[in-house]
Each structure stands twice: as C-alpha cells, then as structure tokens.
Image: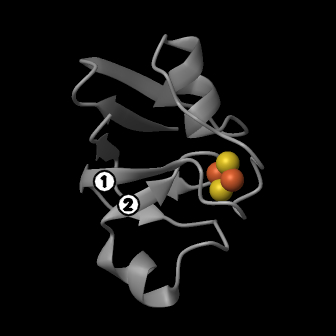
Amino acid sequence: AFTVQAARSGVTVQVPVGCSISSVLLKAGVTVWTSCEQGVCGTCLTPLLAGEADHRDRYQTAEEKAAQNQVALCCSRALSPTLVLDL
Ligand code: FES
C-alpha cells in the first residue's frame, strides 16, 4: 500500500494492492475523471506535486514519465511512500 494526498481536496487515502488510485479517491469523495481505466486515453492524468510515481500508463512518453509532473490515476502505482496530487 502507499499513501495518496489530494492536496486541494484535503483528503489522504491509503491505496491497497489491487485497488487503483482513482477508485480509492472516488470512494473517499474526490472527483476523478476516468474513461478507459487502462492507461491509454490520458483522461485521468493529474498533476503530481510531490513523490515518485510508478507509471503504468501507455499515454505519456518516456520523457514525460521521467519528468514526474503528472500521473495516470487509473493504473499507476507509487515508488515513493506518498504521492501528492494537485486534486
Ligand atoms: Fe484512460 Fe486513465 S482513464 S488513462
């Protein structure tokens, strides 16, 4: 599990193995827009303020992934203990 903070919403959640960041945030009442839920469309890309994402999408380029400026919430995991989102 890892921690995700939705900074603007003031919500912090634990994302267990097998659950997507987007599904956990939705359950916590944070609006997350998704479409494909497979890392393809880019709908769920959200600015990443802090932390290091384990990108699992196929939407961002390798350069974009390395920049760690945004994260696809439907499929990605975390390499750092916490991800802080501009959400
Ligand atoms: Fe399509 Fe996340 S919903 S990439």
Residue 70: quarter of image: bottom left
Disc 2 residue type (three-letter): Gln
| Quadrant showing the C terminus | top left
**Residue at 34% over, 47% down:** 81
**Disc 1 crowd, CA 10 A, few/some/many (<14, 14-19, 20+):** many
Check disc 1 and give the amino acid type.
Leu
Q: Which mark is residue 48?
A: 1
Q: In the figure, residue 86 lies in which quadrant?
A: top left
> Where 25 sits versus 81, above or below?
above
Q: Point out residue 75 in the picture as x, y percentages from the top left corner.
A: 65, 52
- Is 39 placed above or below 84 here? below
Q: Earlier in the sequence, mark 2 or mark 1?
A: 1
Label 2, ligand 1: CB separation under 8 Å = no
Lateral position of residue 4 relative to residue 75, left or right? left
Q: Nearer the viewer, residue 71 or 18?
A: 71
Mark 2 touches mark 1? (CB < 8 Å)? yes
Classify mark 1: helix, strand or loop.
strand
Q: Which mark is residue 70?
A: 2
Which residue does the image show at 38% across and 35% down from the upper left? Answer: 4
Colour scheme of this structure image?
one colour
- Tally the marks: 2
- The picture quadrant where one finds residue 55 is bottom right
Whether residue 79 appears in this view of the structure is: no
**Dot 2 crowding, Cα within 10 Å, few <14, some 14–19, many 20+:** many
Between the C-alphas of marks 2 and 1, the distance is 5 Å
Toward the bottom, the furthest residue is 63
Residue 61 % position (x, y): 52, 84
Q: Nearer the viewer, residue 62 or 77?
A: 62
